[in-house]
């Protein structure tokens, strides 16, 4: 949803991108259907804070030259080693025009299922929706607490705003609850260990009985 505002400045043509980044700015470009592509620079700390809070699938406003422009990030380029943002592409959108977006799915309550020996197997990380930018959330919460082994949650089970349309098939599985394979390995190990101990005790008992019989005969 559009509830954040970042300040941007037109990027001077004589300043190289690496110099901007050293000064704490992220170079980028802003464009739209009725807007000429314009090189910009945004304060890195503010941009990183926004993405940490809302993710890269975020709609926000850019304040530039006494004008507020609603935008969405079309591309975030990162350094392959440091993962630092090196460049962004921001597309100007119309507040009254419907847009399509992939909304991330956030799982809540998985620690409770882990304690019960149930693992959550994710099938979809995002779902595609359509609606006005102000109605599109930064993520969709899926609560799995209490979900039993063998159960699943489908796209049609997700709770989203009535103002949005889901473009994915409602029958698509978002996640499934399966047996925790790690727990299964631990159980197998414990069973084998108990069997080993039991067999060892039986062998020790037989050896003791055999020794006792030998001593008695002598």
Image (cartoon, rainbow, N blue to C red):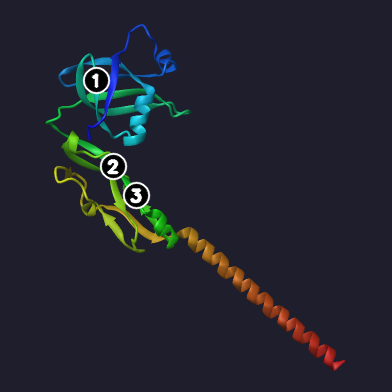
Q: Check the image and report above or below for 46 versus 57.
A: above
Q: Earlier in the sequence, mark 1 or mark 2?
A: 1
State the SS at label 3: strand
Q: Nearer the viewer, mark 1 or mark 2?
A: 1
Q: Check the image and report above or below for 212 versus 8.
A: below
Within-10-Å neighbours for mark 1: few <14, some 14–19, many 20+: some
State the SS at label 2: loop
Numbered mark located on residue 63 in the image: 1
Instruction: Identify the image quadrant of the N terminus.
Output: top left
Q: Residue at x 41, y 55 (%)?
A: 111
| Residue furthest right in the image | 218
Alpha carbons under labels 2 and 3: distance apart: 10 Å
**Which residue, given by chain and number where applicable, does mark 2 sit on?**
139
**Which residue, given by chain and number where applicable, does mark 3 sit on?**
107
Residue 212 image position (x, y, % from top left):
80, 88
**Residue 3 horizontal side relative to residue 86, left or right:** left
Q: Badges 1 and 2: C-beta atoms under 8 Å apart?
A: no
Q: Earlier in the sequence, mark 2 or mark 3?
A: 3
Residue 31 image position (x, y, % from top left):
22, 20
Residue 213 image position (x, y, % from top left):
79, 90
Q: Earlier in the sequence, mark 3 or mark 1?
A: 1
Q: Nearer the viewer, residue 62 or 208?
A: 62
């Amino acid at each position: 949803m559009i509830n954040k505002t970042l300040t941007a400045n037109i990027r001077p043509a004589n300043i190289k991108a690496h110099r901007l980044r050293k000064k704490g700015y992220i170079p980028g470009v802003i464009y739209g259907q009725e807007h000429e592509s314009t090189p910009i620079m945004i304060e890195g700390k503010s941009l990183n804070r926004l993405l940490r809070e809302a993710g890269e699938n975020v709609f926000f406003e850019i304040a530039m030259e006494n004008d507020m422009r609603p935008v969405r990030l079309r591309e975030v380029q990162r350094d392959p080693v440091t993962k630092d943002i090196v460049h962004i592409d921001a597309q100007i959108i119309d507040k009254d025009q419907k847009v399509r977006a992939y909304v991330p799915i956030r799982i809540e309550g998985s620690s409770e299922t882990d304690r019960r020996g149930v693992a959550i197997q994710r099938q979809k990380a995002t779902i595609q929706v359509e609606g006005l930018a102000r109605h599109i959330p930064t993520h969709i919460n899926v609560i799995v607490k209490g979900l039993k082994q063998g159960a699943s949650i489908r796209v049609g089970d997700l709770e989203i705003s009535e103002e949005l349309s889901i473009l994915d098939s409602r029958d698509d599985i978002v996640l499934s609850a399966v047996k925790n394979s790690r727990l299964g390995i631990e159980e197998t190990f414990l069973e084998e260990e108990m069997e080993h101990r039991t067999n060892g005790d039986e062998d020790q008992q037989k050896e003791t009985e055999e020794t006792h019989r030998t001593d008695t005969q002598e």
